[in-house]
Amino acid sequence: MSMEFQKGAAVPAGRVVRKGRIKQALTRWCLHDLGEKWPMEKICRTAVEMGVPAIEVVPPEEFPLLRKFGLVSALTTSHMFVRGMNNPLHWDECLNKIGSSIDANAEAGFPNVVTFTGFSDTTVPEPGTRAGSMVSREEGIRNCVEGYKKIVGHAERKKVTICLEPLNTRDGADMKGHPGYQGDHLDFCLEVIDKVGSPALKLLFDIYHVQIMDGDLIRRIGTLKGKIGHVQVAGNPGRGEIGADQEINFPPLMRALLDIGYDGYVGLEFIPVRDTMQSLIEAVALLDV
């Protein structure tokens, strides 16, 4: 899928959500016009007009704007994906950021905070770290489990869910994949979640990343009742629109989520390659099963 941004005619949003069984969220970082990012206020106004109740990938400093529009932060940011919980060198940074976001969510009444395993190569040059060796799968799982056990009690008390995200390592294009990320398969992330054993640590089921690495989406959703804390969508290949010109059939996936009793949010984390407003209208309507 090409990244040729085409300027389309202005399309007023208007209410798009009719059924509302799937609680959708617009994604803050990937909305743009000809590569120029939408300001947060425009995203909020568009969500309200469409009948979408939430925005995702939101830092706590933008909560006042969400409250102004009566919107929810469906997924609040914390640490980034390079330095994660698979390496004790990064625990202080990660735990501080996760903890701060948990506290902000609890105060605002918002549900989820994102987290990542981190890269397996500790030699990745990052500020404040020292060079090391590759973190093995077994070591990475062990470190993640030990690290998350330091914070899940706090999340439980605050009634906030930490959502661990698998990311694909096959696509090397910027923000379409993350070669070197350790938790690239569902099984890695689920083993961590199961061993931590807390209702405050769940899976972020990113349909785009899972399709690339594991596939078999409907069957996998069917095995994850009670374990999914948040869902994200994007078309594959290319992380573009979720319509008919890519390989994932999204309405059956939404129905599969409803079948297992999933009542969380579904974030539209795709990077538009056509008119952004029209793409959002089409995507919100498609997921509104």
Image (tube, rainbow, N blue to C red):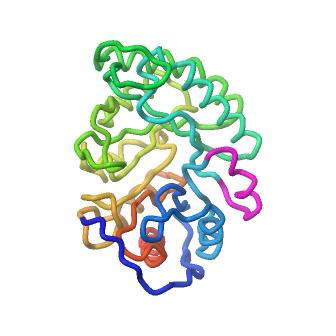
Start and end of the magenta stretch? 59-72
Q: Position of residue 204 (x, y in %)?
A: 45, 43
Left or right for 7, reference 71: left
Q: Quadrant of residue 68?
A: bottom right
Above or below, 115 against 110 in this view is above
Indicate the quadrant containing the C terminus: top left, top right, bottom left or bottom right.
Answer: bottom left
- Disc count in the image? 0
Indicate the quadrant containing the N terminus: top left, top right, bottom left or bottom right.
Answer: bottom left
Left or right for 11, reference 71: left
Q: Magenta includes 136?
A: no
Q: Position of residue 227 (x, y in %)?
A: 46, 39
Residue at (24% x, 58% y) in the render? 237
Given residues 6 and 197, the one toward you in this image is: 6
Residue 222 in view: yes
Above or below, 285 against 143 in this view is below
Q: Position of residue 215 (x, y in %)?
A: 24, 48
> Of helix, strand and loop, which mostly describes the magenta segment?
helix
Above or below, 12 against 131 in this view is below
Given residues 133 and 143, the one toward you in this image is: 133
Left or right for 24, reference 212: right
Left or right for 130, reference 115: left
Q: Position of residue 202 (x, y in %)?
A: 49, 36
Residue at (44% x, 68% y) in the render? 287
Residue at (44% x, 51% y) in the render? 260
Residue at (59% x, 51% y) in the render? 74
Residue 289 in view: no
Above or below, 142 against 67 in this view is above
